[in-house]
Image (cartoon, rainbow, N blue to C red):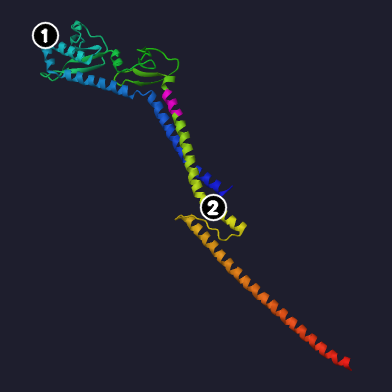
Amino acid sequence: MSFKFKTILLFLLVSLVPYTVTMLIFGASLREEQSQNITNLDLSMERIDQNLQNLQNDLAFMARSEVMNDLYTNDLDHRISRMLLSKKEDLHLSGDFFLTTFEGRIIASSDFAAIGTQFGATPLFEKAVISSFENKPVATLSVVYDLENLQRFFTNSNHRHYYLITGEGEKRFQPQEFFESVQVEAPVAAMSGIRVVLEEDKAFAYRLAEKFESWFLLTLGIGGVIIVIIALLFAVALVRPLLRLSDAAKRVTQTKDYTTQVPIDRNDEIGNLADAFNRMIRGMDHAIGEITTLNHEIEDTQREVVFTMGAIGESRCQTGCRILQASRTPLRSR
């Protein structure tokens, strides 16, 4: 495996693996949060609980009102009943307020027709009325709260609706039933046995989640491609000077051209390596030049020695021939 391929592979692993893991974790957390938000009852339950708490506060305020002193005059002008009726209208209440004796007889009510009758309903809240003269309970103020009041906190559509389940398991105010649905329920804290159910068509509920997954996968793919391109560019930019150094070394080895230089202008380790390579090649070229000059000098010296030895040998040969001739001539004359 080449250094270039190893470098590119390393860049891809270092960049793609953390990116992919991070995106998958982020996507999983978003999907979980989105799935939870599909059937989130928190806002509706907060509004219901706040409304019922306000109703309790109103009941306590009316129980302490000075108008309650009319109990001692048997409420001849119905001031208490008018106050209760006014509060009912302000709250748009489906139900009524009742002021009863401890024996259960209705003294005053927002329902004028019920005055004087026996109270037999189940109140949602009740509060003792304390006499400001005797400082002791003298009556009970209660409110009958119909379940229809909770409907004002429900926002229904063709794909999403609310309904109630009573303690007996009866479903109240359910507009329709979905073929497949997701649902969540929560109890009404102030109403024993009453649960609010939020139901949503399953296909509709997960449409955003599926759309999110499609966009997430597309974003993940585009991001991966961008990272691959950037990693390749960086890896190639990093490896290119090293490849040029390698090619230059091969060229010097093959052509014996020691004038080769690698023009890499960088202020890092690769630049230092290129400078060292160029200095080494220049040094080798200089050394080879000196060796070549020395070889020429040696060749010239050897040539001179050969010529000198040849001349000496020729001179000796001529001298010997003359001596030989001189020694032969007297013998002939004799």
On screen, residue 13 above or below 102:
below
Residue 242: percent from left, percent from top:
53, 52
Per the rendering, the mark at residue 244 is: 2
Residue 270: percent from left, percent from top:
49, 55
Residue type at tag 1:
Asp
Residue 50: percent from left, percent from top:
26, 22
Residue type at tag 2:
Arg
Q: Is residue 35 left or right of residue 293?
A: left
**For residue 289, which quarter of the picture?**
bottom right
Residue 7: percent from left, percent from top:
52, 47
On screen, residue 217 above or below 72:
below
Q: Main secondary structure of the magenta part?
A: helix
Magenta span has 211? yes
First in sequence, mark 2 or 1: give its number.
1
Label 1: how many Cα within 10 Å (few below 14, some 14–19, many 20+): few
Which residue does the image show at 41% across and 25% down from the upper left?
208
Per the rendering, the mark at residue 77 is: 1
Relative depth, front residue between 266 and 108: 266
Q: Is residue 203 left or right of residue 96?
A: right
Residue 16 in view in this figure: no
Per the rendering, the mark at residue 90 is: none
Label 2, secondary structure: give it.
helix
On screen, residue 225 above or below 180:
below
- Span highlighted in magenta in the image: 207-214
